[in-house]
């Protein structure tokens, strides 16, 4: 899986088919400070349910691989 959610330093995979829904739920949780239930995948690609509390979580990284990536230059 190339899409991921990073929470408290831990990476969770997101299925391509679920990416829009997960993004919507994460946005809703963070903006409205509410809990949401997400289906994500662990490092072994096992489906797990993650409960995200938008009121208690200071930040979430959502990498959906949208758009071009910046290049690294030395």
Image: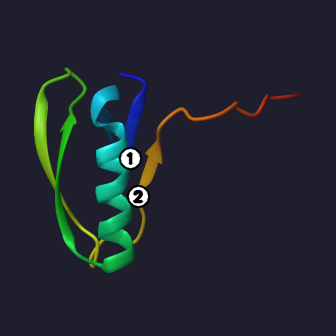
Q: Which one is nearer the viewer's eye here, 43 or 4?
A: 4
Q: Which one is nearer the viewer's eye here, 67 or 8?
A: 67
- For the rendered model, the colour scheme is rainbow
Q: Is residue 52 above or below residue 35?
A: above
The answer to whether residue 3 is left or right of residue 49 is right
The answer to whether residue 54 is left or right of residue 61 is left
Question: Disc count in the image?
Answer: 2
Residue 18, quarter of the rendered image: top left
Residue 15, quarter of the rendered image: top left
Q: Residue at x 13, y 25 (%)?
A: 46
Q: Is residue 27 above or below residue 50?
A: below
Label 1: few (<14), some (14–19) or many (≥20) C-alpha neighbours in 10 Å: some
Residue marked by disc 2: 60
Q: Position of residue 5 (x, y in %)?
A: 36, 44
Q: Report the disc number at residue 6.
A: 1
| Disc 2 secondary structure class | loop
**Cα–Cα span, label 2 and label 1:** 6 Å
């Amino acid at each position: 899986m190339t899409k991921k959610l990073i929470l408290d330093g831990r990476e969770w995979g997101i299925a391509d088919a679920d990416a829009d829904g997960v993004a919507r739920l994460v946005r809703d949780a963070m903006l409205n400070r509410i809990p949401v239930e997400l289906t994500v995948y662990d490092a072994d690609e096992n489906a797990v349910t993650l409960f995200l509390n938008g009121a208690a979580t200071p930040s979430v990284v959502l990498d959906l691989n949208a758009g071009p990536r910046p290049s690294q230059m030395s």
